[in-house]
Every structure is written in structure tokens, then in C-alpha cells.
Amino acid sequence: KQEVTQIPAALSVPEGENLVLNCSFTDSAIYNLQWFRQDPGKGLTSLLLIQSSQREQTSGRLNASLDKSSGRSTLYIAASQPGDSATYLCAVTTDSWGKLQFGAGTQVVVTP
Amino acid sequence: NAGVMQNPRHLVRRRGQEARLRCSPMKGHSHVYWYRQLPEEGLKFMVYLQKENIIDESGMPKERFSAEFPKEGPSILRIQQVVRGDSAAYFCASSPTGLNSPLHFGNGTRLTVT
């Protein structure tokens, strides 16, 4: 049974520091892995999608890596800003329908 | 291009009433997913639909819950005879192709059962 774990559960950093968020999954038979951002009271915003054959994806200050064999993904956010404060969720696609299995999330606070 | 639209944003129901949650996917998206986020828990898959078809309902409780995505109109998640344990945020997501395209989520419907 697939389990997705995110560590740490919460993280607080001063503005300007780089953020490193970790995601691990127990079954390497995934189709892809996605990182999302969730703001309080809002829905999820897709940040990056990494196909199972890819090693990383980049978008602006965000970079996500995927090591499928070891069941790990890391999301890096460079030069954090207060606007980056949110909960970050990773999710893996476990079947051909695109169904996602989510981790519990990492709550990030960037202090000015 | 409007995003995924969910309504209502907040819904209060008494125990035993029915709750109907609506989701209009993004234009051109024919794949709809419903997820539930219980307090202090992560997001859990409920059901996956394409137009007029339920493809996977493995995450949906077998009793009281149903979902549809008709040829015309929004997708509907229906909960009959609600109980306190149904209180949660219900999110709808859509995609154009299903697998390997990013999901676009709505802002959710927050259901409170009193």
C-alpha cells in the first residue's frame, strides 16, 4: 500500500533563506509526482509535475527533484519570501486514471 | 479562462439533511476528481468521473454518497442523511487528459454538519 510522508510537518525560516521540503513514498511504481501549494481557506495550486522518467523540474525559484528508486522527492524554494508562507503538499499518481495520493503537507512560515 | 468553480463555498446542514456540492471544471476539461479533507487529515481521493461515466469510486463511502457528471452541467457530489463525521472540506479538481497533466483545483466547499 502506498504511503506518502512529508517531513518536517512545519517549518519557519527568515526571509531570504532557501527552503527545503522533503517527500517520501513507499512504492516506487508511480506515474508522476506533483507538488502543490495550499493557502488557508483556499484550494490547491499546482506548482510542479515531475514525470516518473524525469529527475527534476524547475519553475522560477522552485526546483523539484525526484529519485524514484529511493522513493524521495525534494522541493527547493530559493530566496524565500513572506508570500511563500503556505502549506506545501506532495502527491503521487498511483494509477492510470491520474488519481493522486497526498502527503499530510509541510506548513511553511517565512518571517520578514 | 475561469478556473474550477465550486459552489457553495460554505454549506451548513443539520444531521439527516442532504448536501449537494457542485463543481464546474475548467473549460475543455472532461476529467473530474473529488477529494475530501477532514480536519487534521490529509486530502483523500473520493471519486473520478468523465462525462456521464463514473470511472473510479473506490474512495467514496458506499452508503449515502453519490456523484455524477452529466453531459450538460456541473459535476455533483451528493451526500444523503449527513452525519457530523461528514464535516470536511470537499475539493473538486479537473484536468484535460487525466494522467500526466496537472490537476486544477477549485477553492472547495466547506461542509459543516450541526
Image (cartoon, coloured by chain):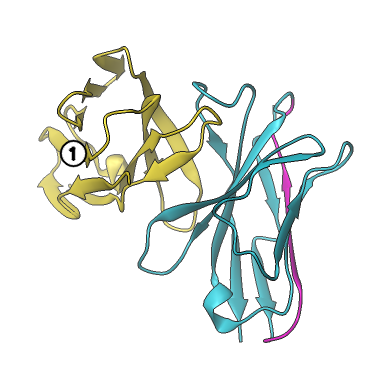
Chain colours: A yellow, B cyan
Residue A12 in sight: yes
| Quadrant of the drawing holding the C terminus of chain B | bottom right
Question: What amino acid is at disc 1?
Answer: Leu
Please say if B68 is above or below B8.
Answer: above
Residue A109: % across, % down = 22, 51
What segment carries the magenta color? B15-27
Identified at 23% across, 37% down, the residue is: A81
- Place of residue B5 in the rendered image (x, y in percent of width and height, measured from the top left): 69, 44
State the quadrant of the N terminus of chain B: top right
Relative image position of residue B85 (x, y in whole percent): 53, 78
- Residue placed most toward the observer, B60 or A102: B60
Q: Quadrant of residue A52?
A: top left
Is B8 magenta? The answer is no
At horizontal 74% and vertical 73% (from top left) the residue drawn is B80
SS of the residue at dot 1?
strand
Q: Residue at x 45, y 39 (%)?
A: A100
Q: Which residue is mark 1?
A: A21
Is A12 on the left or on the right of A46, as rendered? left
> Does residue B15 sit above or below B89 in this rendering?
below
Q: Is residue A5 left or right of residue B82?
A: left
Q: Is residue B2 visible?
A: no
- Front position in the image: B3 or B21: B21
